[in-house]
Image (cartoon, rainbow, N blue to C red):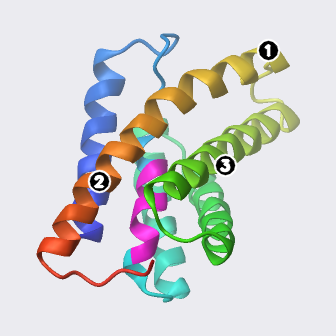
Amino acid sequence: MIIFIICVSMLLESITSNLIPLNSFFTPLFSLVSLVLIYPYFANNDTNYLKTCAIVGVIYDLVFTNTLFFNLLIFIIIGLVIKFINIVLSNNFINVMIITMISIITYLIITYLILTLIGYKTFNLQYLVSTMSRSLIANILYSFIFYLITDKISKKHKILKID
């Protein structure tokens, strides 16, 4: 189920990023959302989860951003955030959407800060806020729909996941 979620998310992100302009209303971060969706399938095996976050980060770097190790580190940090939030919240569709929101906001803020601090690119705060709003709407909808699909598949095939 884990590989299925990651592959579908990356495929959909690749398709949407090629079809939709970068400055449009819709900013896909489906690979990041996949980290939220796969966490319950690791059944408290945090080491393997963080390794998976690192692998997804490297793939994301190579396929989508042409950087190396930038998103690897950020995805590991996001994985830790997801892990700690899941300690407090149970696994249901509302909490998955909340965790998705927190993960996307954290990702965008970390990326914004790093790129600004190293002087790679300067952004204004208004750009960050508009990017957050564009990203949240579509990705929360994606996480909701994909959570329902994977939850139904998991129950049908009795795939173990934590609640």
Image quarter where the N terminus lies is bottom left
Within-10-Å neighbours for mark 1: few <14, some 14–19, many 20+: few
- Residue found at x 22% / y 72%: 154
Within-10-Å neighbours for mark 2: few <14, some 14–19, many 20+: few
Rounded to the nearest angstrom, the CA distance separating label 2 from label 3 is 19 Å
Q: In which quarter of the image is residue 90?
A: bottom right
Residue annotated with mark 3: 102
Residue annotated with mark 1: 126
Q: Are marks 2 and 3 in contact (CB under 8 Å)?
A: no
Residue annotated with mark 2: 148
Q: Do the residues labelled 1 and 3 touch (CB within 8 Å)?
A: no
| Residue numbers of the magenta segment | 32-40
Mark 2, secondary structure of its residue: helix
- Residue found at x 43% / y 86%: 43
Q: Disc 1 or disc 2, which is closer to the eye?
A: 2
Q: Which of marks 1 and 2 is nearer the N terminus?
A: 1
Q: Magenta residues: mostly which secondary structure?
A: helix
Give how far across and how far down residue 18 sits, in percent: 30, 21
Give how far across and how far down residue 147 sits, in percent: 34, 54
